Amino acid sequence: MAVDKVDMQNPDDIENTSDCCFHEEFKDLAEVKDLISKLPDNYNEQTKRELSFERITQIVDYYQAQPHLIDPHIESILSDLLKITRSNDSPPELINEAFKYVYLITKMRGYKVIVRFLPHEVADVEPVMALLVKQDPTDFTCWETRYIILLWMSMLCKIPFDLTRLDASGKAGQKEPIMDRIYKLGERYLTVNDKSRDAAAFMMSHFVTRPDVSKVKLSPFLDWALQTLREADCETMLGINKACGVLSTIALLYKHGKREDMLQYAPKVLDGISECNLKEKENSILRKIAIKVTQRLGLTFLKTQVISWRYNRGNRSLASNLQSKKDEAVGNQQINTIQDDEEHEDIPESIEEILGELLEGLRDRDTIVRWSAAKGIGRVTGRLPRSLADEVVESVLQLFTLQETDGAWHGGCLAIAELGRRGLLLPERLPTVVPVVLKALAYDERKGNFSVGSHVRDAACYVCWSFARAYEPEEIKPFVNRIANGLIIATIFDREVNVRKAASAAFQENVGRQGIFPHGIDIVTTADYFVVGNRSQCYLEISVYIAQFEEYTESLVNHLVNVKISHWDSAIRELSAEALYNLTATCPQYMIKTALPTILSRTASIDLFMRHGAVLAAAYITHALYDYALQNKQKIQDILDETILDELADIALKLQNANLFKGLGGELMRKAVCCLINKLSISEIPVHGRPIVDLWQDIIDDCLLHVEPEVQASAVDALPTMISEYYISEEIILQQKQDEIIKRYLNYLNSSTQTIRCGFSLALGSLPKAMLNGRLRAVLDGLIKTSQIVSGQEAMAESRRDAIKAITSICKTVGVEENGSCDIVLTKDNIPQIYEAFLAAMLDYTLDSRGDVGAWVREASMSGLLELTILVVNTAPNLITPNICEKMFGCLVQQCCEKIDRTRAHAGNIFYQLLYLNPSVPNIPHKEFLLKVFSQSNFNTAGLDQINWAAPSVTFPLFIKLLEVPVYTYRVLVGTCVSVGGLTESLVQNSSQSLFHYINSVEKDQSKLKHFCDTLLQIYSDYLKVNRVSIPLLKMTDQLLSRASLDKYLYFEGCTMSVSLCECVKREIQRSADPQKLMASADVFCGLLPFEEARKKVLFQLMVFLCHRYPRVRKTTANKLYEALLMYDDVISDEIIDEVQSTLCDTDWDLPVDQLRPIRNNLCDLMGVTKPVIKSQTAGTS
């Protein structure tokens, strides 16, 4: 909730609901003691010092939720640390480190607790003073030291003895009186810019309020404080910090000081604060402290007393609710007596000004200021006579008007909660207050495309929570149903998770404290604090459970109908419509007679949100009533009268005539009307043969032409249900209509606009079986054509993806019949054609600015292969030929080895499902080997869904093993080379490790190495100039050569692999201007230097690169060649190696090519390599 309940409870009894675990004791005491004992040895070594500090910080954070566990050990821990600080042998660095540890303990438990354990003997005053004097207030590295010392001084200032006794008397050169020294230090630290300012304020409040000091220093200090406040420039951070320090001290003075001492200065302080006009300042902390000072002044003006008119509930223990009602009644008679006698006392005029400031603070724009003002209202009101207190309540209630801001509503809720919690809101005020709180529970002020008010609703939940503790059940009883319904609505239907949880907590508190909320225990058990965190579950499940209790049913429905279906957030409107669908079964008659007519009257509203939500709600309620009618063996027209049915059918026409499908909100209304058409068609609304059906068809077609995929998707959902209900018939007219629709849709597949292709592809895929009857061949041919890459249309990846999805959907719709008609079902004649379309789509690697968009097509194709194979295997498995199965598994294996995690995960999932499909897929190549490699025992998971195929560490070690099978070698190597030459570290590492592990395992088998190398050369040939493969392939080849993985085969007598590889790389880089490819090829050429058969060609190519037009290529080549000559000492003779290496190393390869060419030619002469000759000015070499 907006206000933490810690303020109202004992911290030790608080039940922490955070993610951290609960502890029964502080178990790390020994480790903390050990860290402290090692502090003198570790503080000089930075690494050990930082590790120790980090560890104790972790321990403190670990117990932060249950800080009271350290209480039994605080004294011993502080004793060890302060022993270090009090030692004369401790250097300043060690003292600072010890004080940092003390600060961590203070941060964990709070300074108010820790300060009680600090030594406070008279002998400690001078040493602590000396420590404080040595500190530099500007040293930001030691602020913890200054903070703790000031806290220590605050405790020492409370020692009950006269400070003058510490002053040396009668001695020459005596020190300044200790009172003056402490005073000056306090003033000095009140204006610093770190946390020690807070400790200084705490210390000064205790020091100045001492009886012996207040006589001398209180008046001068207040004068100084007010003067400092006037002079502070609150437009700068320095001025703000100075003002905050002074104000904090004044607030603490009036908290800790005696009233009789402070009262005489209160008017002057109040005037000084008013002069500064702090409420207009920008800094929220400054305004908050000003409000705190104001309330402290108000408490000073009024005597401390227990007012007789205060409402007292008495025993607030939860156990009292378990007593009998009779006992409670007796107890209430004894406890709840509110005396009406007024407190006859003159109230100072300043109280009116103070209350005015506090009430104005409730309107502040910052929550912390409003919260401080609310607490001030509660405290000050608690000392007023009943008549004046009632005026305060009336003033607070005036904040709840439409003219006030959301901040004022929030502040008003906080104030009411404080008044109620303190017994200052008398029961006779409840009839006025409860309606206001209920309004606040539903407060939501729209501002453009968003709203404000969640903090108001949150605070209203806090009010309800406080009422549960403040009043007896008899007082709340007249309002129970209204409060319960308001909290339930907020618990289930609020948009914000914090409000739902706050409302749930408030409801639970009322159930426990009051015991009269209807069905409270049942609801609290179901809609607990954690369950309401899921918004969809609240709307669609919990609401249905609560609606079974008649006390809540109508209020839930009314809230959805009157509020939520017009919410500014479209997601809430959609959820509300679905919730109404679920709730209809609990109150069908109310929906028929009240809710649906109300909703229909709003479907043409000028408010877009209202109109959109009303159309959706009407659609879902109609569908729910249709289901209700079916359960009672009725039709929709039996439970809805003709007028309502006509209104439902004419919604689309009204919106069309009003031009509401265009302009602002047109997309929303298109989706809503498509949903309406879908639901009305499902509900079998009797409009068969009426013109409205043609209008619906036109709307759907228009939505399929829309550019937004969501609009198209809603039209695709509506199309099959509408066609099934209104077009499927043997009538000639309807058959002609079906032909027209399919012909029109197929023509749109040839559109030059991608979004149009997408929409109508999906539409064709959604058609019902009856409409595809006799038209299947034409539809499949059109979609297969759309799924193919055509010159000039390569960028249309989304349309190809949707065409593949449509083919898959049609396959599932029509089914398989081996000897059937190709115009009706899938048969032996058209199944190979569909497989070929899917397999062709697996080769779609289209790239654009978004990356590999062809992956969408490949993923859709893999899903299609799975669905089609399942259909065929279950009907006519003989149609899956060895050729089809080999291609299918080969493509899947390749996708399982490629670089995109999402695609690899999808491919692995499909591959695994097909491998273990039941009934099994026939003709899988080397199925026994696959079953051995992909044995279910290899996966330590509970099921298929938990196998992380996206993880390279899972995928590659398995699929690399398929290199042993010739059928899969090519596909695995193509996919793996893209991954090994990729960019992602984990991908490259896992894929390369798996590949090298395999090669090492077969290095003694020349036949397998030869097959691997031949496949590698084949890939170079097949993917010539295909950068997607060729560049990663060059990088993988470089790794193979640099690791000497293929040396066993390349050094084999008669092996020409090195020459062939050199030629392949030369063809790849011919006329290439891609620096990345050229530098990758230089790596490969350098890797081929050890092989004498290719050495001359390799050196020639490297010499060409040394005079390439790109300086980056020249420098990279020189560096790589230099490294290669260092590594391979037999490439050139020892006589020239030094000269060649020095030339490569010392030459500035950024010089113009004309200056570099003689140097390069000299290298050619030294190494006996033919000098490159310029063949063309466009070749890029010299």
Image: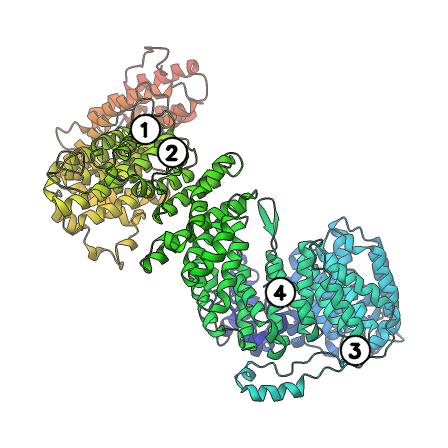
Q: Do the residues under discs 3 and 4 have CB atoms within 8 angstroms? A: no
Q: Mark 1 or mark 3, which has the lower sequence index?
A: 3
Q: CA distance from mark 3 to mark 2?
A: 78 Å
Instruction: Tell me, for residue 701, which label it has, or none.
Output: 2
Task: Please state which of the two labelled residues, at mark 4 or mark 2, is closer to the viewer.
Answer: 2
Q: Nearer the viewer, residue 776 or 263?
A: 776
Q: Nearer the viewer, residue 46 or 219?
A: 219
Label 1 belongs to which residue? Answer: 744
Label 3 belongs to which residue? Answer: 304
Q: Mark 4 or mark 2, which has the lower sequence index?
A: 4
Q: CA distance from mark 1 to mark 4?
A: 62 Å
Amino acid type of the residue that numbered disc 2 sits on in the rendered structure: Asp
Residue at coordinates 75% horizontally, 74% vertically from top-left? 382
Element type at marker 1? helix
Label 4 belongs to which residue? Answer: 3
Image x and y of residue 1140, in percent = 35, 24
Q: CA distance from mark 3 to mark 4?
A: 26 Å
Amino acid type of the residue that numbered disc 4 sits on in the rendered structure: Val
Q: Nearer the viewer, residue 172 or 640?
A: 640
- 443 relative position to 983: left or right: right
Q: Mark 1 or mark 4, which has the lower sequence index?
A: 4
Element type at marker 3? loop
